[in-house]
Structure formats: C-alpha cells, structure tokens
Amino acid sequence: ILVELIGGIDTARELVMEAIANGKHVVTANKALIALHGDEVFQAAKSNDVTVRYEAAIGGGIPIVKAIREGLVGNRIKWIAGIINGTSNFILSEMARPGASRSFDDVLKEAQELGYAEADPTFDIEGIDAAHKLTILATIAFGIPLSFPAIYTEGISSVTPSDVQLASELGYRIRHLGIAKKLNDVVELRVHPTLVPDYEMLAQVDGVMNAVMIGSDVAGATMYYGAGAGAGPTASAVMADIVDVVRFGTNLPDAGFSRTEVAKINKIDSIYSAYYLRLGVMDKPGVLAHVSSILGEHDVSIEVLNQKDARPSDPQIIIITNEVAESVINAAINQLSSLEEITSGVTRIRVADFR
C-alpha cells in the first residue's frame, strides 16, 4: 500500500500512478488530486485490480466517505450541505462572538498566528479547498463524474461585521457552506457564504470544526461532526483506510456507487434560493417604498424587511426574500444598484433551507 500524504498535485499524481501501475493499493489525503484527476486515478486502479482510499481528504476524522458509500447505500441522496473548511469556519465564528465586531482581516490575522490559516490563505477563504471536497462528496453521493470546474465558488472575504450582526438579529448565523443537490437529472454544486437558521445544527458548528448534513429519501436528514484537520484526525482516517484495504481489497468501489450517471450541472443563475439583501440608502422619504416596488416588479416576495440606522448618516435596508431564481434576484439587484438613493451598493448572501 502506498500512503500519499505529501499534498500538491504533480509529484503526488506521478507517485500514485506509478504505484497503481505496479499493482499497489493507494491511501491518500490529497483532495486536490482526487477532485482534479480522480477519474484517471480510479480508472487506472480498476485496470490494475487495486483500490484507492481517500477518507482523510474530506472532513479530517469524520468518516464521511464511509458513511455515504456504505452507511447510506440503501438511500437515494437528495442533498449535501457541509462546513468542510475549518479556517473559514473559524473566521466566521470569531466574527460572530458577542460584542466582538471584528473585521475579516483582523480574524484572518489571528487564524494565521494560531496556525489555522496558511500565509497564503486563498484556497481556504476563497472556497477552493471546500470545492475540492464537495466535488468528491457529490461523486460519491450521486454517482456523477468528478466535476470540479463546474462548481460555483465564492469566498468569505466580503462578509462584514455588520452582516454577521444583522444575521444574528434576524435569527441566522453565516456559515461558508458547500452545497450539492440532485434535482431529477440536474445537479447543483456551489460553495458560498450562507445564512443558516439558528435552530439548524450546522449553525452551532463553531471554530475549526467541520460538519456535513445529508438529506436522503429513507434515512432523512443525518449529520456528521468532528475535527476537520490536524495530525490526529488525519491519522485516524488514514489508518481506517489502510484497514479497509486489508479487509476488503477491491470489494468496495473507489467512488461510492458503482454507477456513473451523466448529469447536467446547473449554472448558479439557475438555482432557486432565498436571499439576504443589505442596502445602504439615503435618509429621505419614499426610499423603502421604491425598493419594495422594484422587488415587486421582479416578482420577488419579501419575508423580512427592516430599516436600520447604524449611524444617522448611514441608514440601511435589510431584506430577506422568499425563494426565487438567482437570475431574477440578479436582475432586481442590478436595477436597485442603479438607484440614486442607494449609497453603498447591494450586499447579497444566500439563505439555506434544508426542509
């Protein structure tokens, strides 16, 4: 068995492919290698009658691959929603501490000092690391080819202390989620900041911890929680994979279900979601009515509408919409942004609904 824990893509891929060609099984923690080259690796493994295991690539010590591939094998999985990057979750959790009101940059600096974030944190805070993991989860869950280039990816660097505080006042917490949904023959794959209702278990996941919720037809909604990184959790997952190779060899499929379904990956403007909107506006009569009128013209119904005066010179309108197509909300935002009364653009964050 070759155990590959060096990371990166090029050298790791060369080693893995050479090991497979020489009849060696592979255990890896390399999510980028699997997300970007997994189809090639799995095909080579099949041709050489060996297996590839990668539990440590997703969720650290959480046995999420085994849960989907084996524990939920009697289900059709409908959706996955996960906090699958500890760095971004630490930053958002710290920004939400009561009375903290800390900026993204301040908390990122602390995360780097504590060793939770790299000197170049781009992969974590821009969602690339989470997108690698979501690619693999969707393939295991839905039996589709690995589809990393198709994932919509949005980072958390634009989330402000105001958004965190306002979300809390409305009964939500902001989390950086990876979301995969199967809608008949269409699949949604997206990573972005998301308002999660306080009552949902995902909203309670703080710090560098990871958690994955899975919605399925028979078991219903289940959740898997634990340390997403670190020496111990990674070693736990690697050892579990080694034991699986010894016990089962090639009797478990590398990529979950043995079927491979070709599915259309939805563009982000085709999804349906509720939305949180924050608009900086002029302090003058009629602004609220004008904003509501424009949303009405686009058939965007409003669930929550508040006007906040953080400072007398900085009034804001806070809106949570009902579910609507992303293309529709984009058109409404473009029209709102062009108004003379809008002083600081329109902030938009999607709202999660796991019902």
Image (cartoon, grey):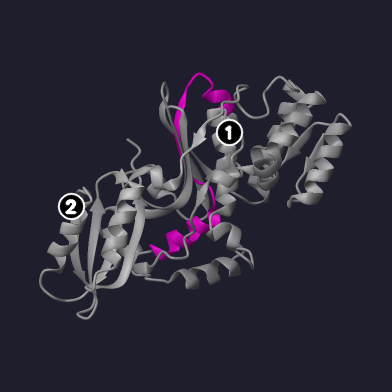
Q: Which residues are magenta?
A: 67-96
Tell whether position 233 is magenta: no
Q: Nearer the viewer, residue 161 or 335?
A: 335
Q: Is residue 219 left or right of residue 227?
A: left
Residue 253 image label? none
Can the viewer see residue 118 in this picture?
A: yes
Residue at left 35%, top 38%?
Answer: 354
Counting from the top left corner in percent of width and height, residue 176 is at 46, 53
Label 2 or label 1, whichever lies nearer to me, is 2
Q: Which residue is mark 2?
A: 296
Q: Amino acid at mark 1?
A: Thr
Circle 2 crowding by C-alpha within 10 Å: few under 14, some 14–19, many from 20 = few
| Residue visible at 32% across and 69% down in the picture | 345
| Residue 16, above or below 160 | above
- Which of pointers 2 and 1 lies earlier in the amino acid sequence? 1
- Relative to residue 271, is residue 1 depicted above or below? above
Q: Residue furthest bottom?
A: 313
What residue lies at 21% left-to-right and 73% top-to-bottom?
Answer: 341
Residue 2, position as x, y percentages in the image? 82, 38
Q: CA distance from mark 2 to mark 1?
A: 39 Å
Extreme right residue here? 22
Residue that numbered label 1 is attached to:
139
Indicate whether residue 77 is drawn in magenta.
yes
What residue is rendered at 68% in x and 41% in y? 34
Q: Position of residue 133 (x, y in %)?
A: 58, 44
Tag 2's secondary structure? helix
Q: Nearer the viewer, residue 56 or 215?
A: 215
